[in-house]
Image (tube, rainbow, N blue to C red):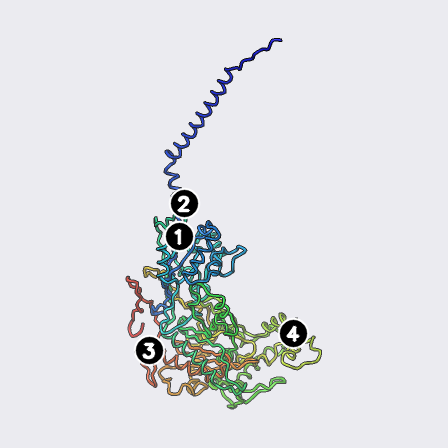
Amino acid sequence: MNAVLIRPDRSKGRVRLFVLQVLMLSLFATLLARLWFLQGLSGEEYQAKAAEQSVRDVVVQPARGLIVDAMGRPLVANRVSWVVSVDRTVLGNLAEASREALLRKIAATTGEKYDDVLARTRLCGTPDAVKGTCWNGSPFQPIPVATDVPQKVAVRISEQAEDYPGVVAQRESVRAYPSPYGVNAAGVLGYLSAVTAEELEDAEKDGDKTLNGASVVGRAGLEKTYDQWLRGIPGFQKVVVDSMGRTQGSSGEVAATPGDTLVTSIDAKVQGVVERELHEAITNARKTFDKVTGKNYVADSGAAVVLDAKTGNVVAMASQPTYDPSVWVGGITSKQLKRLYSKKHGLPLVQRAIQGQFAPGSTWKPIMTVGALNHGFSEDTRLDCSSGLQVGNRWFKNYESASAGMIGFDRALQLSCDTFFYRVGLSFWNKYGSNAGNVNAKDPLAAEARSFGFGAKTGVDLPGEASGRISDRKWKRSYWDAMKGYYCKVDKRNKTGKRDFLHVFAHEFCLEGNLYRASDAVNFSIGQGDTMVTPLQLARAYAAISNGGTLFAPRIAKAIVDPDGKVVKRIAPVVQGKVKSKKAALKYVDTALQGTPKVGTLGWKFGGFPLDKVKIRGKTGSAEVWGKQSTSWVATYTKDYVVVMMVTQGGTGSGTSGPAVRKIWEALYGIEGMDVKPAKATIPGTTPPRRLPTFAEDGSILPPARRGGGR
């Protein structure tokens, strides 16, 4: 068979080659078209986007507003602090070894511990975050890892940017405390701490642009109450960086708006005197022997308040123990924080003037007098100031078992006679409430106490105020309902019949703790038992006696002033209510209390004081607390001011607080010996200023302009 030779079809090869050529040409055409599109039509757009990737927005924190006293003296100001921050994005792009080396270098340069620097770069909410140290702001915002860095260190970091990739050193404004006249005022001023994630979320929902991840916010005192005005509005700076996060320059800035200034009614001179005298009273009490307990007074805490009687404005407010408010600046250590919450160190964070609740003792008696005169007793009433009074199966003695015979309300107040007021309280109990189980029985004395604002917050413009309590029938029943389970268990477990205080009390409470007995009524009449007041509540009540019955919501802030010196908000006195009383009853008590510094329990501490010129009214108190030494109280006032001081476990009112209160009055009225010299007074003209300080164009703050002889 002959073989057949088949030749390849050349026409098909040519077709394939042609198709391949067309595809190649189409591909090149597409690439060329795309290149022309990117570089021609869209080149500028993509170039701008590429450049944008090397620009970072850095938040510029605003200077927080000042807090000044009534004369314009700064109580809280600002100072410049150098802060070293790390760009967490750049940090994350570094190899682990390089990242650790960088953080160790920062720690060594700034004098910080490596572990602390590392902890500050952790985002809160992540497994390795350390609560209180981690970063709760935006991960794209530079994270502060070292504050209050020396300027030369900050400059070195800035100049050696190639050695510190992603690290910036810049100036920030932080809180400073000028302490005019040595004032502390920590409990009034408050403190700041870092914004929380929850607060940032809330701010974002509300469209609030004043907060960001690096913000600090007010946590206590005036800093918290007026935070929205003080914080200001952050600005933004556009910083150009290279691929390693090193700053190459700036491409624009939106300036931050400083916070507003808060003008207060505090007078730094008075505040300084009050703080020193409170400290001195506590110090002296600790050196004084207590015959009752056989040891020196513990004098573990105290508080003092000076009010403007006509407006309710707070002129001074002090609390002991206290703390240095600067410990919060730049972050507080766990050791420092533990001390502030420590019972061993006296709970320094507690502002006892508004948060401390104490038995008022005999300073309660003027309130009881007003109640008695409004409900059946008269100015001519005479009752026996005997050495004691039998009530049920208990003998209630007069203080130091003194006896003064038949006296009126005026002398009973001046001598602070307990048995006189026992008889007043017992009279109302016999008349209206001898049914001990009737919680709705009429109680004129408790009603008068509520009329004076006790048992409720005063409304002062500080957070965390306590309400105190009036231990009337309804309170006793509610307390019994809440606690009977506990005390009945204690009583039931007492198989051996122990007779110590706890077990006797538990037995009686379990059986009859709901009953309001005659003993409760007589205790209530002298400010003993379970009634509790704050020093500010007591000061406000005495201001109401002074001004004729008006109850003000105490105010510390007077005005908000913007950075340009313009008053944007005036904070006027707030009338919270009127005391339900006859004018004659208030006037009678006012007149009677003028005798206390002259011939009463304060007389031995006010000898030589010009009481004919400065008509001080007063009342002392020594409140007894089971298991502790007595609490010292002195409450005094004129038509201008109220001065109240108390020292827990400090002894008698006149003995411990009397000398300190006298010195405060001498400072207020410029008294030297027997002479009143208003020209040298702490407050010229002897009355608080009604006008605001003057804010000059150059930024200086001048005292309020005088009008006539005063201000």
**Compared with residue 90, is residue 35 higher up or lower down, i.e. above or below?**
above
Out of 421 and 282, give the one closest to the viewer.
282
User: Residue 200's spot in the image, x, y percent?
Assistant: 47, 55
Q: Amino acid type of disc 4?
A: Tyr
Q: Residue furthest right?
A: 495
- Which dot, 2 or 3, sits closer to the camera? 2
* Residue that numbered label 4 is attached to: 487
Of mark 2 and mark 1, the one earlier in the sequence is 2
Q: Which residue: 49% across, 59% down?
A: 119
User: Horizontal placement of 219 versus 475: left or right?
Assistant: left
Of mark 2 and mark 3, the one earlier in the sequence is 2
Q: For marks 3 and 1, give the CA distance.
A: 51 Å
Q: For marks 1 and 4, give the CA distance.
A: 61 Å
Q: Amino acid type of disc 3?
A: Ala
Out of 34 and 266, give the one closest to the viewer.
34
Check disc 4 and report its element: helix, strand or loop. Answer: helix
Q: Which numbered disc covers residue 681?
A: 3
Q: Which residue: 45% across, 23% down?
A: 22
- Which dot, 1 or 4, sits closer to the camera? 1
Q: For marks 2 and 3, give the CA distance.
A: 64 Å
Do tag 4 and tag 3 residues touch (Cβ < 8 Å)? no
User: Residue 161's spot in the image, x, y percent?
Assistant: 37, 53
Q: For marks 4 and 3, give the CA distance.
A: 56 Å
Do tag 3 and tag 1 residues touch (Cβ < 8 Å)? no
